[in-house]
Image (cartoon, grey):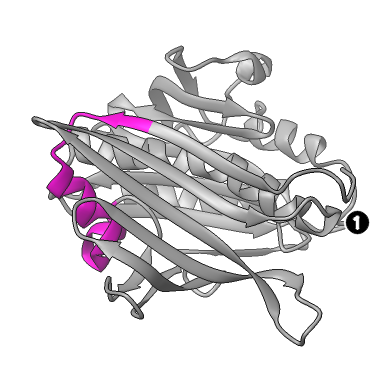
Amino acid sequence: MTQDSPARQFDLTLELAAPKEAVWKALSEAPEITRWFAPEARADARVGGEITWSWSGLHDWPMTVDACEPGKHLRARYASSVDDGEGGKRPLFIDFHIEGRGGSSVLRLVHSGFGPEADFDAEFDGISRGWPVELGSLRLYLERHAGQARHLTWLTRELSGDPNGDPNEAWRALTGAGGLGAGEGVDQLHEGAPFDFTSADGDRFQGSVLRCHERELSGIASNWGDGFLRVGIENCGGKWQAWLWLATWGERDPRLDALEQNWSARLATLFPAAETAGA
């Protein structure tokens, strides 16, 4: 990308079978945010207030609210990783626009401020990969589990070795027979396709795909109470990590304790000499 290229923004519109009031709460109230997005959140949704999304010490995302029209528009600003040449960082912006149509809504997300410079590439690529997955979680929560507490089983493991090495090998190990048992065809799955696989530890996952992207799969796990399953190999801050994530809602599934133990041991087996973290 050259300096003459235009600025970039990520723009996604999502139809939701939920009233706009519920969508607004899911975006602006901390307890609701933690039911579909970050495990921890603080939210003061007023102009000049702050909203922070947190992933258990692995990543904090603090923002300042620049615009707030309850039920209609929320705009937040935060510092990018790119220097502004004056001792600070160039800002990035997230806009949520909501329109209500009876008992349904249309949510438009615009993530902007990315310059054409290569310095912005990693951040832009990251949010372009992440938002479709996260908004899939939002839709699942609002349409099937609205108002219910979320139970999150989430483990990550930093991969040892060269951070610039081939992550595809790690993905094949994670999804292969010695890992989740998803099979070689996992990369060809498409939105709406059924899946049914049993991990090396005997944990079975059945459901339908929400999104299948490079080294990442998310879907609705029907045999886990229509939970949100996410599996991936991601570059986080220049370090490759394996992610295993299952969110369930309502009454806590008694199988989750065993699943967490299995996932922790499996990641340690697949990726030795690395570190495991999670919630």
- Quadrant of the image containing the C terminus: bottom left
- Quadrant of the image containing the N terminus: top right
Q: For residue 53, which quarter of the picture? A: bottom left
Q: Residue at x 71, y 69 (%)?
A: 81
Q: For residue 40, which quarter of the picture? A: bottom left
Residue 229 lies left or right of residue 224; in this view the side is right
Total numbered labels:
1
Q: For residue 181, which quarter of the picture? A: top right
Q: Residue flagged by tag 1: what amino acid is it?
A: Asp
How far across and down, in percent of the image, does residue 109 sit? 43, 44
Quick check: 23 above or below 160?
Answer: above
Residue placed furthest toward the bottom: 87
Q: Residue at x 42, y 27 (%)?
A: 204
- In the image, the segment drawn in magenta is 14-35
Q: Residues within 10 Å of mark 1 (few under 14, many from 20)?
A: few
How far across and down, in percent of the image, does residue 36 sit? 32, 50
Q: Is residue 29 magenta?
A: yes
How far across and down, in percent of the image, does residue 7 sit? 71, 49
Q: Nearer the viewer, residue 49 or 224?
A: 49
Quick check: 156 above or below 233?
Answer: below
Q: Is residue 224 magenta?
A: no
Q: Nearer the viewer, residue 171 or 102?
A: 102
Q: Nearer the viewer, residue 157 or 81?
A: 81
Quick check: 21 above or below 175?
Answer: below
Whether residue 250 is visible:
no
Residue pointed to by mark 1: 162
Q: Residue at x 12, y 50 (%)?
A: 147
Secondary structure under the numbered disc 1 in the rendered image: loop
Quick check: 18 above or below 120?
Answer: above
Q: Nearer the viewer, residue 269 or 106?
A: 106
Residue 245 lies left or right of residue 250; in this view the side is right
